[in-house]
Image: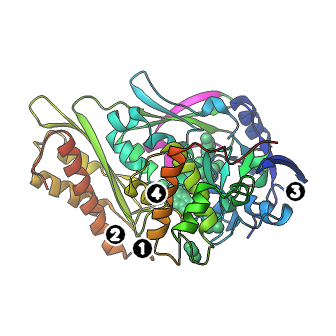
Amino acid sequence: MFPARFDYLRASSTDEAVAALAQHGGEARILAGGQSLIPAMRFRLARPSVLIDINAIDDLRYLRETGGSLLIGAGTRDAALETSELVTSGYRMIADVSVLVADPVVRQSGTVVGSICHSDPAGDWGVAALAGRAQIVVRGPAGTRTLSADDFLVDSFTTALAENEMALEVQFPRPSEHTSGAFAKLERKVGDFATASAAVQLTLDTSGAIAEAGVAIGAVGAKALRVSEAEQLLRGAKPSKDVIRAAADAARKEADPGSDTRGSAEFKKEMAGVLVARALVSALERLGVGGMA
Amino acid sequence: MKVALTVNGTAFERDVEPRMLLAYFLREELGLTGTHVGCDTSSCGCCVVLFDGERAVKSCTMFAVMADGHEITTVEGLAQGGKLHPLQQAFWDCHGLQCGFCTPGMMLTSVAFLKKNPHPSEGEIREALSGNLCRCTGYQNIVKAVQQAAGELAAEPVAEPVAVS
Ligand SMILES: Cc1cc2nc3c(=O)[nH]c(=O)nc-3n(C[C@H](O)[C@H](O)[C@H](O)COP(=O)(O)OP(=O)(O)OC[C@H]3O[C@@H](n4cnc5c(N)ncnc54)[C@H](O)[C@@H]3O)c2cc1C
Ligand code: FES
Ligand code: FES
């Protein structure tokens, strides 16, 4: 089915895109890779009357490290990450996501920022943004503001973006030498949305104890969920099978999935725990702490 | 809305609604029916075309207006001067197709992939094609075909599939 009629505007700069949003407000949507928006429009789940295409804004297509963070511009497609030495060497959890999100052809169009703006509860980038304590830079007529992923991801398909705002970039703080992470995803087949997913990032202190932890789960709630209880359990603990099990249990408790063709609610809750445990094991392995499986 | 784009080296201009999807534009406005529509929801990959010579895109999930000013290559643009593209020849040689419905998408996805990774392993080929579904072949011969074409393309750089006229 073709989408309902709309007007198409191609923005050649961020200024132009923001001005167009200011003019059309709630009627308009930003069009990035289109890999979520176009299917939604075809199913008439979305019915914007104006699309503002940002694909021609070359200034938004960047992937670089500045000020201790990885900056991913709103024009940067998933495919740019999987081949980036910067990402594969320094940002292991993000590198994991970059080869598990969607399929290789979709990744040549879909953008990281677009995925976060879509706030699909089953999406992968929102989960990574929570675990990696990412920040999202947004711009509206009044200027720019920066939000944490927690504040940005409000609900299913709902973000903190105002009608006249667009997202410019997502920033992932650079993991220190004693920090690593991992992303684990259960999918029915390649390219499918997650049945359940988990992202973790851990920092060890000099004694080998866990100084800092980020734990998030996907596809098991109204949005990507932070598992604060697991983070608290991990913080200050020495890596052990017991603390991993406790963190996994906290994830099971936090998960609040619905039953669908990908599995029953009970199964998905169980998987949220299993995936948190697996992600913790591989993050610890990457930090040189083995024997946790 | 006016759309001016280059398809397989030829410039076209058409007046279409912004909601016209690229796959339908190619098939119905330009009569290039080599681009197939299967799932129509960005899942199967049989509508894949090459965007600006480098990006494999699912043309059922792109509006034709997004291609304004850009260059598209479809399966019809692969053969040059009556000679099959190495990928086409390899699909023929290796029996990489049965019904042929998935084949254009398989080949265009492979063109983009081999440009980035001219010496892929079998596993990398399988991964690169994992967004393209085939209901007939069981994939073995598709993978063989891409391996053969990779060898040929790497050995003897051929002309770009799009000769801009
Ligand atoms: C077959 C298939 C499988 C997929 N599998 C997965 C998967 O496994 N995991 C997963 O996470 N995703 C998956 N996706 C979704 C895919 O990753 C999308 O590309 C991504 O979620 C959205 O990115 P986009 O650039 O295509 O955004 P678009 O579709 O262009 O936009 C999505 C939404 O975000 C808004 N938006 C986009 N950019 C901005 C911006 N800069 N500022 C403000 N608003 C903006 C749009 O207005 C729209 O509402 C899949 C998609 C397909 C087609
Ligand atoms: S028809 Fe486009 S992906 Fe299936
Ligand atoms: S050859 Fe029939 S679908 Fe692939």
Determine which quarter of the picture holds residue B45.
bottom right
Q: Are marks 2 and 3 on the same chain?
A: no
| Image position of A41 (left or right of B133) | right
Residues at marks 1 and 4, CA–CA distance in whole angstroms: 34 Å
Residue tagged by mark 2? A268
Where residue A207 appears, as percent x and y from the top left, is 8, 31
Residue tagged by mark 1? A262
Where residue B23 appears, as percent x and y from the top left, is 73, 62
Residue at the image position 42 percent from the left and 37 percent from the top? A134
Residue tagged by mark 3? B16
User: Is label 2 in contact with label 3 (beta carbons under 8 Å)?
Assistant: no
User: Is label 2 in contact with label 1 (beta carbons under 8 Å)?
Assistant: yes
Question: Relative to residue A11, is residue A188 depicted above or below?
Answer: below
Residues at marks 4 and 3, CA–CA distance in whole angstroms: 40 Å
Check disc 3 and report its element: helix, strand or loop. Answer: loop
Marking on residue A178 = none
Front of the two marks 4 and 2? 4
Front of the two marks 4 and 3? 4
Q: Are marks 4 and 3 on the same chain?
A: yes
Determine which quarter of the picture holds residue A194.
bottom left
Residue type at mark 2: give it: Lys
Residues at marks 3 and 1, CA–CA distance in whole angstroms: 39 Å
Per the rendered image, the range of residues in magenta is A143-162
**Dot 4: within a 10 Å radius of its alpha carbon, few (fewer than 14), some, or many (20 or more) residues?**
many
Check disc 1 and report its element: helix, strand or loop. Answer: loop
User: Is label 4 in contact with label 3 (beta carbons under 8 Å)?
Assistant: no
Front of the two marks 1 and 4? 4
Residue tagged by mark 4? B147
Residue type at mark 1: give it: Arg
**Which chain is mark 1 on?**
A
